[in-house]
Amino acid sequence: MDAHSFARTPYLVRAPLLLREILLAFVSETDSCQHPLVDVFGFDQITYDFVKQSTAATLLKLSASFAKANAITFNVNERMLKSLLRSYQSDSSEILSVKDISALDPIYSHRQVVRELVMFMADSLSDIGAGMSNIIEFDHETRRLLNRADVKQLEWLSNQMVERRCVQFTMSQDKIRDRTYSYMRHERREGIKDILVSKKAPYGLMYFLFSEETEESVKWRRYRLGVTPLKGRPKTAPAKEFIDFVCLWTSNQNQTELERFLMAHRQLGYGFDILWALYQRAEIDGEFNESILKATRKNKNLACQI
């Protein structure tokens, strides 16, 4: 998101940062899938292992997905928040204090979590005219006090909110689990794309397998992976390898095109530029016709090894 977008909708940037801090706190507190926090978040063994092994960049992307789905929400005790804001300005010691012990207590011990929440609230209230009054449901006085708070006061406020458990986080376990699985599938898909490009997959094959890919995106992927662009005429393979490719392709009709290309790469040992040329040749020549294949098998006495 560019600077102009951030100025208009800062909460769209702050929300994933807040949720990432929650996930980072979760990762640092849990040592196994049997930890009580795992059930609170709704992770199973697979999603827990994925989150536990993720980088900070991956957690940020996952947090953005959580934010869009409202998978993790929060509820601020407005009465206590207003009391804290007033006390700072008047040096009053009369502050409400409520500290409920919950399974999320280890998360609250990470002050950066609530610090990001306070910044999220402050940014969300910074431009009421932009139609953001529905982001944080506070009354006018609370908004006014929060809007006037400087950096020093916001830091103090975050510490006080931690001490008094002024905020409660709620986890939608189904959404968290579903969004994590969805992102895991996305990561796997992107990883497969990188493998194909690193193994000389041409743009035609990438677009055939992934309709969202464009020439520019493939060029960018090659540049990121340090892969030299393909040049010259497409390479080919011996006639026997072509027949083996056709046998493999037609004998695995229950598999997707992607799975069959990966299988051909493993079994034949060719780069995806050659495999794509073999596929196009078979398409043009009609070699995927079953009757032709049977005749070819009989004449050449071939046995496809699957």
Image: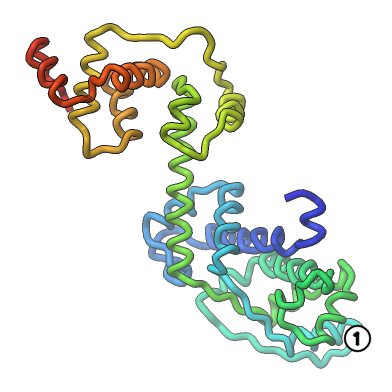
In the image, residue 39 lies at what x, y percent? 42, 70
Q: Residue at x 82, y 58 (%)?
A: 7
The quadrant in which residue 163 appears is bottom right
The type of colouring in the image is rainbow
In the image, residue 192 lies at what x, y percent? 43, 35
Q: Is residue 20 left or right of residue 291?
A: right
In the image, residue 180 lies at what x, y percent? 46, 57
Marks counted in the figure total 1
The quadrant in which residue 116 appears is bottom right
Q: Residue at x 21, y 17 (%)?
A: 244
Q: Is residue 111 left or right of residue 192?
A: right
Q: Is residue 231 left or right of residue 293?
A: right
**Element assignment for label 1:** loop
In the image, residue 85 lies at what x, y percent? 83, 82
Query: Which residue is more in the foreground, 169 or 211?
Result: 211
Q: Residue at x 58, y 22 (%)?
A: 226
The three-letter code of the residue at mark 1 reads Asp
The quadrant in which residue 287 appears is top left
| Picture layout, residue 38 above or below residue 60 | below
Q: Quadrant of the C terminus?
A: top left
Instruction: List the single residue furthest toward the right.
Output: 90
Query: Which residue is more in the foreground, 138 or 104?
Result: 138
Query: Which residue is more in the foreground, 145 or 88?
Result: 145
Q: Residues within 10 Å of mark 1 (few under 14, many from 20)?
A: few
Q: Which residue is mark 1?
A: 91
Q: Residue at x 86, y 81 (%)?
A: 145
